[in-house]
Structure formats: structure tokens, C-alpha cells
Image (tube, coloured by chain):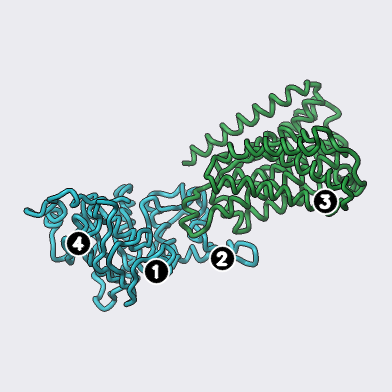
Chain colours: A cyan, B green
């Protein structure tokens, strides 16, 4: 796997001092992070570390209590889901949000259909879908096959293709390999690598350190609502990451409000 | 579906010399067209993941409304348009209740079925209304060469329905509603708008059915069109649309309405008492639903 040139990488989002609480539970307590294009940033951490809360703020689903997002040098207190998509932040959630009974082109264009007068321009949508899938090197038997009949990896790829079709420059992937077999996982990791080579930014949420070490350029470790460490992949070993995730001596949660939650 | 149709026709042709004749086919087509019209609207609702039990009541209520207006000396053309618009409106009300209060469509339309039937009874005092202008009656029993207006209307509605379902955004979002409403919402589409429109369309076809029933019998009867909902649902599911939504076929619906028409006709020709028709219809629904769910779970 070749490293992209540093020059390709540009700062896309700067996360500044994000705080978010759910009632008494402090999910984020001052997160600072730089997210770049043409780079895979992996976010790792135990359940409840604040990963999901962070990506939900990035994709506009949640509003932070404090802090800001600097996108293309413009500061935003928060984003709405539509704003996030307009600015090129697309999130692929674990459930993928595909319609299983529909074909690939139907799913890629859902909500953004190309039309010819009042009618759907089906052929044009098929052509664009085919080109997009070719560019992402996604192999599918046919564009007409219902998405529900595709393998897990193919479905993940279709969901990524849709994120790109929406205009995504930063693709946030939430546990993309969680439910996949070995070969399917390799395919998805290849796709992530390809996205980086084509200049997209990728934020990868994963519990699997092996996958993280295969594709990530930088790794951010989250713990108790903070970024406990941020390093280049080349500079760290998996066992050191595990140590950071599972708590460093003397930094155990000391009080009740140190409890954090993850999946709201 | 096609095979079933051919087998049934073949069997009945062998059993009875009367079956395979133009006059008998004409009568089958004439009787099937009414069900086909309502079933096209029902195809949209079911493929959108819903159900509408109120179509029979909407048909009756719209027939009654048209009758009252025509007896109030309104021109029949205006009355027909108003009646159909009213049907669309009743469907929209169904859709609004379902989307606003997030209630199961089965229960909502069960309720509105009773409400609308009640309204039809109140308006008429339970007494049928007779005698309408010739121009209006033509829609039920006129002739255009060898075919009847209801057949023509059914053809037009089926074609329009097929175009709408297969080639427009509206059709695609209807299928998406049945596939995964949440995914549609996350794609930036407001599912409620389309759901309300789908029920509106179903109400509209029910009202057209009401117009044809009223014109055919020259009577607006508050208890007309009972069990139409059951027949329409049976037709849609028999035609191959999945009960849980996500796919739909207008061609299947049209063929199924022909098959049901032929079966009904065959029972009469073979001298089987009409009570059995009810039993047959119910059995067909059960078998068709079980088969379609079976097929759908196999696909998953």
C-alpha cells in the first residue's frame, strides 16, 4: 500500500473543543481533531468513548453544546443533516439505509432522480451508476439486481458509492466491516484505500485494530469523551493502541459524571 | 399468473360450451373492469406498504354525493368531476390520519370505512336514490362499438397507473415507502407527502368505481360496493404485489382481476351457488397472501 503524497492532503474540517452532554452524561468533553482529504483517519475507542456522538455531530444529526466545526476555513457552531451533505460530508451508517428490494441505480439516485420531463431518465441513471461503480472498482453482477441480493461487501460499496454520488468529499464509515466475512472485508478495505487515492477523506470508525492498521494513515484514540491520542500509523504499534483504549494508569473514571455514553 | 389464466380458461371451455363465446367474454370484461379500476389504486397503496379497507365505502359515498348533486339540478359532468375529487379528498384524509397520528393503516381505514358508510346512510336516510341523466348513465351501460365505457376507463386507468408507478418519481417513492420508509426519509424525501398522495389516488379510483356502479344501476345505494375492498385486495395480491410492500405490478393486477372475473363467471356457468363465491374469494386472498409472504421471505 503506497502512502499518498503529503501535498495531496488538505485540511477539510477542524473540530474545535466539542462538548456534548446527554443529561448528566458527558459524551464529549473537549474534542479537537483535524480531518483531511486524501487521508484515512481511523477513530478507535471502547464503547461509550464518544465516537458515535462525534460522527453524529459531523453529519449534522446532533448539535454540540459547545465548540465549533471549521470547514473550508468557515466556522460553524453546528450543521444540519442537509448542510453537512451540501458541504460534502456523507455518512454511511451501519444499517446502510439502502432499499433492499430496489436495484443499484435506484438506490444510488434515491431522492435525486434524473428526470426527462415528468419521467425518470432510467438509462442515464444506469449509465452514471455504471461509471461510478467502475471508478470505485466495485463488481456487481448487474445494476438491476435488487440490493438485498448482493453480498454484504457489495452492499457496503453501493452505500459508499451513494455517499460519493451525493457529492461527498469526506466519507464517514461507521463500522463498515462489522458484519462481513474475510474476503468481503478485504474488498471494503481496498475500497477505502482507493477512496483515499482518489482524494477523498475517509473517517473510519472501527473496533477492529487489524483493519485499522491495514488502511489508516492516522489513528485517533478516544477515551471518556476526549481524544486521548492522535498519531501516524507508522509511529505506533497495535498493542500500544490497545493500552490507550483500555485506560492508562491513574486516569480511571473517578466520579459518576465521568460515565460516557456512545450510541444516542 | 398467465399460466393460471390459460389453465382456467381451458378448463372452463372444456366444461361448458357457453363459456368460450364473445358474449360471455364481453360480460366477463364488463364485470372485471370495475374491480380492475379500484384494484389499480389499491396496488399503489399496497406496494407502498399500506392497506385501504375504505374503498368500498368511498365508492358508495361518492355515488351518493353525485346522486344528491344531480337531483339538485347540477350538470352531470360537473357532478362527476366533483364526485371523483371528493374520492381523492377522502383518500387524502385517510393518508393524513395515518401519517399525522402514525396509526396502523388497517385500523385507520377500518374506522373511515365505517364513518363513510355511515355518512352515505345519513345523507340518503338509508333509501336508494334513482333516476339520473342519460349522459351520466352512459358511463355505466353505454356502448362504443363492441366495448363498454367501463372497459375503456379501466384500460385508461391501468395504463396511467402503470406509467405512474414505473416511470415517475411518484411511483418510485411509492415503492420506496413500501421498501423502507426510513431510508427514503434519510434520502431527503418527505415520505408523508407521498403516502398521503398514494391514499388520495386510491380514493380517486374508488370514486370512479362508485361513479360506474351508480351509473350502471341507475341507483345510488348507500350500501353499494360492500366487499369491494376485499376483492380489490385479493386482486392486487393475486397479481403478484407483495402484501408488505416494496414492489408492485399493474399488469399483474389487471390480469388477476380478469382471472377473478373468469372464476366468478365459471362458477355461475357450472351452476355452483353464489354463496361459494364468497368462500372462494376469501380462500384466494389467504392462499395468495401466504404465497406472496413466502416468496418475499425466500428473497430475504
Q: Residue at x 26, y 72 (%)?
A: A4
Q: Earlier in the sequence, mark 2 or mark 4?
A: 2
Residue at mark 3: chain: B
The residue at which mark 4 appears reads as A227
Q: Are marks 2 and 1 in contact (CB under 8 Å)?
A: no
Q: Is residue B281 above or below residue B171?
A: above
The residue at which mark 1 appears reads as A88
Q: Which mark is residue A114?
A: 2
Q: CA distance from mark 2 to mark 4?
A: 42 Å
Q: Would you say residue A13 is visible in this rendering?
A: yes
Q: Secondary structure at mark 4?
A: strand
Q: Are marks 2 and 3 on the same chain?
A: no
Q: Secondary structure at mark 2?
A: loop
Q: Are marks 1 and 4 on the same chain?
A: yes
Nearest to viewer (mark 2 / mark 1): 1
Q: Are marks 3 and 1 on the same chain?
A: no
Give residue A141's position: percent from left, percent from top: 47, 53
Amino acid at each position: 500500500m503506497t502512502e499518498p503524497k503529503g501535498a495531496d492532503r488538505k485540511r477539510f474540517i477542524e473540530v474545535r473543543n466539542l462538548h456534548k452532554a446527554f443529561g448528566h452524561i458527558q459524551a464529549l468533553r473537549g474534542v479537537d481533531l483535524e480531518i483531511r482529504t486524501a487521508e484515512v483517519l481511523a477513530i478507535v475507542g471502547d464503547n461509550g468513548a464518544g465516537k458515535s456522538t462525534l460522527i453524529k455531530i459531523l453529519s449534522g444529526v446532533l448539535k454540540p453544546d459547545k465548540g465549533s466545526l471549521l470547514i473550508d476555513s468557515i466556522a460553524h457552531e453546528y450543521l444540519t443533516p442537509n448542510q453537512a451533505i451540501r458541504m460534502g460530508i456523507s455518512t454511511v451508517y451501519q444499517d446502510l439505509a439502502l432499499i433492499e428490494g430496489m436495484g443499484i441505480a435506484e438506490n444510488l439516485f434515491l431522492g435525486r432522480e434524473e428526470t426527462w420531463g415528468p419521467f425518470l431518465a432510467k438509462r442515464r441513471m444506469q449509465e452514471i451508476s455504471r461509471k461510478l461503480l467502475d471508478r470505485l472498482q466495485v463488481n456487481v453482477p448487474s445494476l438491476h439486481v435488487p440490493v438485498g441480493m448482493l453480498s454484504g461487501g457489495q452492499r457496503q460499496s453501493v452505500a459508499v458509492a451513494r455517499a460519493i454520488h451525493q457529492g461527498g468529499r469526506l466519507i464517514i464509515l461507521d463500522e463498515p466491516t462489522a458484519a462481513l466475512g474475510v474476503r468481503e472485508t478485504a474488498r471494503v478495505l481496498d475500497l477505502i484505500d482507493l477512496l483515499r487515492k482518489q482524494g477523498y477523506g475517509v473517517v473510519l470508525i472501527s473496533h477492529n485494530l487489524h483493519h485499522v492498521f491495514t488502511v489508516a494513515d492516522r489513528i485517533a484514540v478516544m477515551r471518556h469523551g476526549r481524544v486521548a491520542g492522535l498519531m501516524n500509523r507508522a509511529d505506533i504499534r497495535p498493542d500500544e493502541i490497545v493500552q490507550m483504549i483500555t485506560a492508562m494508569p491513574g486516569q480511571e473514571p473517578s466520579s459518576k459524571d465521568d460515565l460516557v455514553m456512545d450510541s444516542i | 399468473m398467465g399460466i393460471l389464466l390459460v389453465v382456467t380458461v381451458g378448463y372452463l371451455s372444456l366444461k361448458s360450451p357457453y363459456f368460450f363465446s364473445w358474449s360471455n367474454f364481453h360480460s366477463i370484461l364488463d364485470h372485471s373492469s370495475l374491480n380492475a379500476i379500484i384494484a389499480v389504486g389499491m396496488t399503489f397503496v399496497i406496494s407502498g406498504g399500506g392497506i385501504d379497507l375504505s374503498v368500498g365505502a368511498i365508492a358508495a359515498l361518492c355515488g351518493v354525493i353525485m346522486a344528491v348533486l344531480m337531483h339538485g339540478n347540477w350538470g352531470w359532468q360537473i357532478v362527476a368531476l366533483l364526485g371523483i375529487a371528493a374520492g381523492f379528498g377522502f383518500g387524502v384524509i385517510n393518508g393524513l390520519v395515518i401519517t399525522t397520528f402514525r396509526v396502523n393503516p388497517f385500523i385507520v381505514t377500518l374506522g373511515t370505512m365505517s364513518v363513510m358508510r355511515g355518512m352515505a346512510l345519513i345523507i340518503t336516510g338509508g333509501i336508494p336514490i334513482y333516476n339520473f341523466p342519460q349522459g351520466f348513465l352512459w358511463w355505466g351501460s353505454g356502448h362504443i362499438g363492441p366495448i363498454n365505457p367501463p372497459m375503456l376507463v379501466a384500460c385508461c386507468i391501468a395504463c396511467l397507473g402503470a406509467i405512474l408507478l414505473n416511470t415517475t418519481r411518484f411511483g418510485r417513492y411509492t415503492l420506496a415507502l413500501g421498501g423502507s420508509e426510513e431510508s427514503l426519509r434519510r434520502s431527503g424525501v418527505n415520505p408523508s407527502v407521498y403516502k398521503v398522495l398514494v391514499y388520495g389516488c386510491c380514493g380517486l379510483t374508488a370514486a370512479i368505481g362508485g361513479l360506474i356502479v351508480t351509473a350502471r344501476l341507475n341507483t345510488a345505494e348507500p350500501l353499494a360496493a360492500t366487499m369491494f375492498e376485499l376483492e380489490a385486495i385479493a386482486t392486487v395480491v393475486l397479481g403478484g404485489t407483495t402484501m408488505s410492500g416494496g414492489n408492485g405490478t399493474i399488469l399483474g393486477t389487471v390480469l388477476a382481476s380478469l382471472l377473478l372475473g373468469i372464476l366468478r363467471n365459471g362458477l355461475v356457468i357450472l351452476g355452483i351457488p353464489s354463496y361459494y363465491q364468497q368462500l372462494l374469494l376469501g380462500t384466494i386472498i389467504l392462499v395468495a397472501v401466504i404465497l406472496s409472504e413466502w416468496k418475499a421471505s425466500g428473497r430475504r
